Amino acid sequence: YMLKNVGVPVKNVNTKAPFKIIISYHSSEHRVVMFGPQYNALRNAFPEHEVEIIKLRMKDYSIEEQVRMVSEANIYITADGGGSVSGMFLPAGASMIVYYNDVGGLRRNRQVYTPAMLDWDTHNNFSHMRVHWFPLGKRRGRSASNRDSESSLATLIALVKHELELMSMN
């Protein structure tokens, strides 16, 4: 219904190469996540003729352009909050990988150092796509670079490979 209202055709996820991954970086002034290591790891893990990886700053595009781009993606990678809302326009069978602030929780407008649960209920109840959550790595005693560690990037690559395999089975 929403796609039709902005003139974007409704379709299922692409099941053959080239697959398309969109990485939404710097989606908020408060959650500045650049995703450089994730982009580079994915770029090195997949041949360009099989997987197209596009890194976009979504706020630089109109709503119509964002909807059109996301509706053509197999996988959408973003930080939680406003940048992840575009994920609702993913095609049926697509996947969204959301990086969340693991210490950004608030209670009565006070920092409580628990995971920020922004968008969890909404995204987890979208029946047309699979949603996966990765911590940004800001817990006390841990460096924010944990999301950029070799093991975290290897986990991301394994998840993306798995998701693309699931899509290609349809």
Image (cartoon, rainbow, N blue to C red):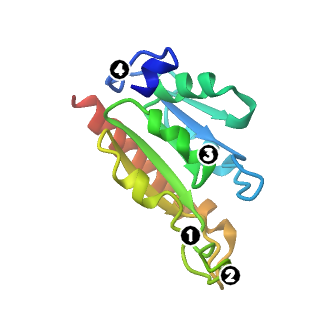
Which quadrant of the figure has residue 135?
bottom right
Label 3 amino acid?
Gly
Q: Position of residue 36 (x, y in %)?
A: 69, 47
Q: Mark 2 or mark 4: which comes first in sequence? A: 4
Distance Cα–Cα, label 1 vs label 3: 15 Å
x 42%, y 15%: residue: 9
Within-10-Å neighbours for mark 3: few <14, some 14–19, many 20+: many
- Element on which disc 2 rests: strand
Q: Is residue 41 above or below residue 30?
A: above
Which residue is drawn at the image coordinates 61% and 45% (left, top)?
83
Mark 4 lies on residue = 11
Q: Which of pointers 1 and 3 lies earlier in the amino acid sequence?
A: 3
**Secondary element at image label 3:** helix
Residue highlighted by disc 3: 83
Q: Nearer the viewer, residue 107 or 61?
A: 107
| Label tally | 4
Residue occupied by mark 2: 110
Q: Is residue 117 above or below residue 34?
A: below
Q: Provide residue 51's location: percent of width, then percent of height.
A: 48, 28
Residue type pointed to by label 2: Arg
Of mark 1 and mark 4, the one earlier in the sequence is 4
Q: Are marks 1 and 4 in contact (CB under 8 Å)?
A: no
Residue 45 visible to an observer of this rendering: no
